[in-house]
């Protein structure tokens, strides 16, 4: 009946509205360092089975197909895309980009561990490396940089060593950065401020040095840009808008059908 169509189209509009929200967030973060875009996944809802297949229709025949009417759609989940973002050379010694799998580990105020792909690190007054966001989370495995070492003399090697040039005396290794990876990185929760947190779905972190145990390597003096593809997102936005309009047209058609039924009594 037309009433079923009204409710079905309404579920479509609600689900598509959520997809537009996800696309909007992707586009808004197109210039966020280390950002990973998401996609909305849909699933169909329950079905009204008005006629079962295989029902005997005569002595020698049976219905080959059922009569089913779907009741709409819902957003099943949002899925993170952990594809590699483009590299941006910054020339800033404390910037580091992960090439491949892995996330940096930072200390959260509640005592937990946060994970991030953003590598824009800053040296704090204690000589430690902190994430250059609005909070300044401390890197879990941060080296302590002596006061007499200037930032321009520091470099980060592909295997995660933080090295300071010591002039004629050669080089001094200040510390070793480590990365963490997860069996299911899509199961991480986005906390905001470029931070992900672990969940039961993500699994336990596997921690190791860059360039080992399946971890990617580090590129010093560079940052990983957002993996949002603006053209793709805009195309998806246009498609979603059109499908949203079709669902609204379904509601209009169902309303007109109900109006015809209401006028039959006159």
Image: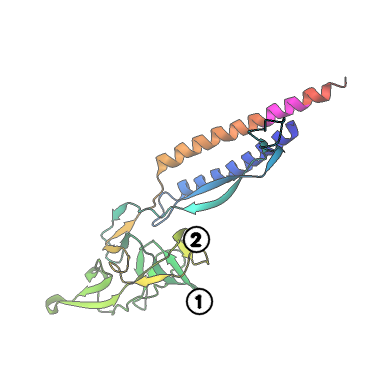
Q: What stretch is highlighted in magenta?
A: 251-258
Q: Which residue is drawn at 35% across and 52% down?
A: 85
Point out the image quarter for the N terminus.
top right
SS for tag 1?
loop
Q: How is the image coloured?
A: rainbow
Disc 1 versus disc 2: distance between alpha carbons? Answer: 21 Å
148 over 21 or under it: above or below? below
Mark 1 or mark 2, whichever is nearer to me:
2
Few, some or many C-alpha atoms within 10 Å of disc 1 (few <14, some 14-19, many ≥20)?
Answer: few
Quadrant of the rendered structure where residue 107 is? bottom left
Is residue 121 magenta-colored?
A: no
Point out the image quarter for the C terminus.
top right
Q: Which residue is drawn at 64% across and 44% down?
A: 45
227 over 163 or under it: above or below? above
- Percent of width and height locating residue 213: 32, 69
Which residue matches tag 2?
Answer: 187
Which residue matches tag 1?
Answer: 111
- Percent of width and height locating residue 81: 43, 52
114 over 147 or under it: above or below? above
57 left or right of 240 in image: right
Q: Residue at x 58, y 48 (%)?
A: 75
Dominant SS of magenta comes to helix
143 left or right of 230 in image: left
SS for tag 2?
helix
Q: Residue at x 65, y 40 (%)?
A: 72
201 or 137: which is nearer to us? 201
Q: How many marks?
A: 2
68 left or right of 25 in image: right
- Percent of width and height locating residue 147: 28, 79
């Amino acid at each position: 009946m037309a009433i079923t169509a009204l409710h079905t189209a309404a579920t479509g509009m609600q689900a598509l509205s959520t997809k537009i929200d996800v696309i909007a967030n992707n586009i808004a973060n197109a210039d966020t360092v280390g950002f990973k875009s998401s996609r909305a996944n849909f699933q169909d809802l329950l079905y009204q089975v008005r006629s079962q297949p295989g029902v005997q229709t005569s002595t020698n025949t049976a219905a080959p197909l059922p009569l089913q009417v779907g009741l709409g759609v819902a957003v099943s989940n949002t899925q993170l895309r952990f594809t590699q973002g483009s590299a941006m050379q910054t020339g800033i010694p404390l910037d580091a980009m992960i090439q491949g799998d892995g996330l940096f580990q930072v200390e959260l105020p509640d005592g937990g561990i946060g994970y991030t792909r953003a590598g824009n690190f800053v040296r704090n007054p204690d000589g430690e490396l902190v994430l250059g966001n609005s909070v300044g989370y401390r890197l879990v495995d941060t080296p302590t940089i002596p006061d007499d070492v200037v930032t321009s003399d520091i470099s980060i090697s592909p295997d995660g060593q933080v090295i300071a040039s010591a002039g004629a005396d050669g080089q001094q290794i200040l510390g070793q950065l480590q990365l963490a990876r997860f069996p299911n990185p899509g199961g991480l929760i986005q906390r905001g401020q470029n931070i992900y947190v672990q969940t039961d779905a993500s699994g336990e972190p596997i921690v190791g040095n860059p360039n080992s145990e399946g971890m990617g390597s580090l590129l010093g003096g560079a940052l990983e840009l957002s993996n949002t593809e603006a053209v793709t997102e805009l195309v998806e936005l246009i498609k979603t808008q059109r499908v949203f309009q079709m669902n609204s047209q379904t509601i209009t058609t169902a309303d007109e059908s109900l109006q015809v039924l209401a006028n039959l009594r006159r």
